[in-house]
Amino acid sequence: MHQGLNKTHRIAILEEGMKYTQIGISPEDAQMLESRKFSQIEMASIFQVPPHKVGNMDKATFTNIEHQAQEFLGDTLLYWLTLWEQTISWKLLTLVDRSRYFAEFLTANLLRGDLKSRYESYAIARQWGWYSADDIREKENENPLPDGQGKSYLVPMNMTTTNQSGHSTSVNYLKETEVSKKDEA
């Protein structure tokens, strides 16, 4: 009875003890909420932190959070981490200690992807011989396989170096071609 554009600004009559409950938000409250969002964004920009790190999820999506984390690490954290590493080395380690020890912040876990992506990259690294099973288990914070089973590296059988196959490399082929041309001349 009291909804719609043609019935705006009319007085609603509440019968039989009904009570008015405001459904929307008042303009003052809306302005306060907008002011609060602005404060969050300002705070994030002062400290060079992505807005989602201070709880402002307005422009955050599942697809861009990972990229925002990479930007946060590269644009903000790496500067401070490098500064702290250098200060630790300079103030806490002697010259002799510096040849044996160093300070380093491991940031790989900050960029750690989802489980499926990590396992796919591990599969590629394992199949191409970059990682052993124990290397992968170490990255996942698991114990090595017993009796050294995880220490071996795989090699693709369909690929080999030219030296092993008996063929000359392209550099050797070019040199051989140049020599044969000189002999012909």
Image (spheres, grey):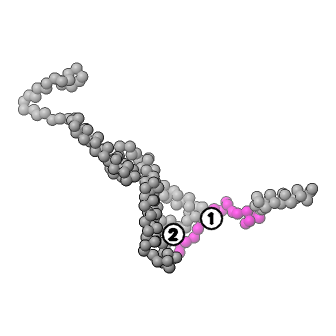
Q: Quadrant of the N terminus?
A: top left
In the drawing, what numbered circle is on residue 36? none
156 is within the stretch colored magenta: yes
Does the magenta stretch mainly form a helix, a strand or a loop? loop
Label 2 sits on residue: 134
Q: Nearer the viewer, residue 150 or 102?
A: 102
From the image, tell me which residue sits under label 1: 155
* Pick the front one: 179 or 105: 105
What's the CA distance linking mark 1 and mark 2?
16 Å
In the picture, measured across the screen, residue 26 lies left or right of residue 137, that is left
Q: Which residues are magenta?
A: 146-166
Residue at the spot x=10%, y=28% of the render?
A: 14
Q: Which residue does the image show at 17% across and 35% down from the upper left?
A: 22
Residue extending farthest to the right is 185
Mark 1 vs 2, N-terminal side: 2
Furthest residue toward bottom: 96
Residue at the spot 41% in from the left edge and 47% down from the top edge: 62
Q: Position of residue 128 (x, y in %)?
A: 60, 61
Figure quadrant of the C terminus: bottom right
Q: Secondary structure at mark 2?
A: helix
Name which residue type carries label 2: Asp
